[in-house]
Image: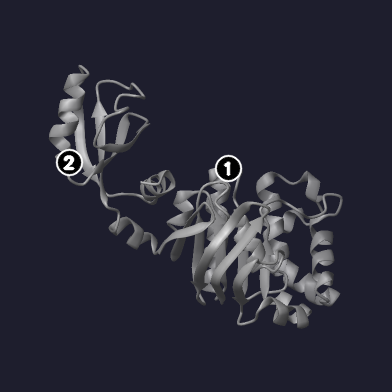
Amino acid sequence: MIKVNQLSKKFGSLLAVNDVSLNVSEGEIFGLIGPDGAGKTTLIRVICGLLTPDAGEVRVLGLTDREREKGKDAGARNFGYMPQRFSLYGDLTVMENLLFFGEMYSLKKEVIIHRSEEILEITNLVAFKKRFADQLSGGMKQKLALTCALVTRPKLLILDEPTYGVDPEFRKEFWKILYQLNREGMTMLVSTPYMDEAELCTWVAFMNEGSVHVLDTPVGLKEKFPYQVWEVMADTKEPWLFGKTDGILDYSLFGDKYRLIMDKNVEAEAFIEQTLTTKGCTFSQLQKVAPSIEDVFVIMAGGK
C-alpha cells in the first residue's frame, strides 16, 4: 500500500527525514512513533504528496507522485488524510463541511449525503450534524476530521497524531473506530506520541532525528528489549531516590512504585537492596516485570 525507499527531505540545513525506507502492507495498522521533532509529520506529508522529497521515492497504492498527479481525482479518492491540526471550516456545520469536502473530490451530492450518514453513525456524530464546527469539543472536531477523510471510502487512511491533546476516554473511543474500519479492510498509517496507542498497531517504526531506527511488531520490540525492568515499592516516595546510580539506565516513580530499567548484567535484587540500604530505606515489594513499549521508547529516545 505504501513503499518508501531511501527518502530524504531537508529544510535549509535541517535534515528532517534522513534516508528512510519502510513498507506498509494491506490490512495493517502501521504505527509511526517518536519524540517531537523526530520527522514524523514531514514524512507523512511527503507520503501524501504535500511535500516534494529531495531524494528517494514514495509509492502509494502502487503509484509514484507523478503518476498520482496524472490521475488526480481517482488517486486522491483511494486514500484519506487526517492532518495533525484541525483544518476544516468552523463557520460551517458538520454536514456542510462534509458536503464541501466531498464536492472537492467530484462526488455527487446524493452520494456524499448517503456516505456521510453512514460515517456519522460510526463516529457518533449524527446528533451534531447541524452544529457549527467551531462549537464542537476538541474530541468531536477530531471525529469530524476523520469523517471527512472517510467520505471518499478510501482503501488507505493516513493519520498524523489524530488523538493528540484530547482526553483518554476519547482516545479509547477513537481507536475503537479505527479498529472497526480496519476489520472492514482499511489499511492505516498512523503517527502517535502515545505508547499505549503504539501497542495497538500491527507494526511500529520508531523514528528519531529524521531516521527510522527500529522497525518491528510491538511484541517483537518488547521481546528484543536488551535490559531488565524492575518495580520497587519502598518506604519513601523521594522522586530522585535512584538518581545518578550506576547500573540503572532509567527510573521513574508512578504512584507508589519505582520503575527501573537496568543493565542485563546487574544482579538486580542485591543491587537494589544495597542502594536502598545506603540511602536509609527499605523495600516492601520488589519484582521483575515485562518491559512495556514505553520502556522501549524511553531507551531509544535517550540514545541508549
115 above or below 211? below
Residue drawn 72% across the image and 59% down it: 126
Image quadrant in which you'd find residue 98: bottom right
120 above or below 234? below
Residue drawn 37% across the image and 50% down it: 296
Image quadrant in which you'd find residue 70: bottom right
Residue drawn 33% across the image and 62% down it: 220
* SS type, badge 1: loop
Amino acid at circle 1? Asp
70 above or below 149? below
* SS type, badge 2: loop
* Disc number lying in front (2 or 1): 2
Image quadrant in which you'd find residue 177: bottom right
84 above or below 25? above
Q: Position of residue 117 (x, y in %)?
A: 73, 67
Amino acid at circle 2? Val
The answer to whether residue 237 is left or right of residue 122 is left
Q: Position of residue 213 (x, y in %)?
A: 43, 58
- N-terminal label among 2 and 1: 1
Q: Is residue 203 visible?
A: yes
Q: Observer-nearest residue: 278 or 210? A: 210
The answer to whether residue 238 is left or right of residue 197 is left
Residue under label 2, please give it.
266
Q: Is residue 120 visible?
A: no
Mark seen at residue 167: 1
Q: Position of residue 77 (x, y in %)?
A: 72, 76
Residue extending furthest toward the front = 13
Residue drawn 17% across the image and 41% down it: 266
Q: Observer-nearest residue: 108 or 106? A: 106
Q: State the CA–CA distance, disc 2 to disc 1.
A: 39 Å
The answer to whether residue 281 is left or right of residue 44 is left
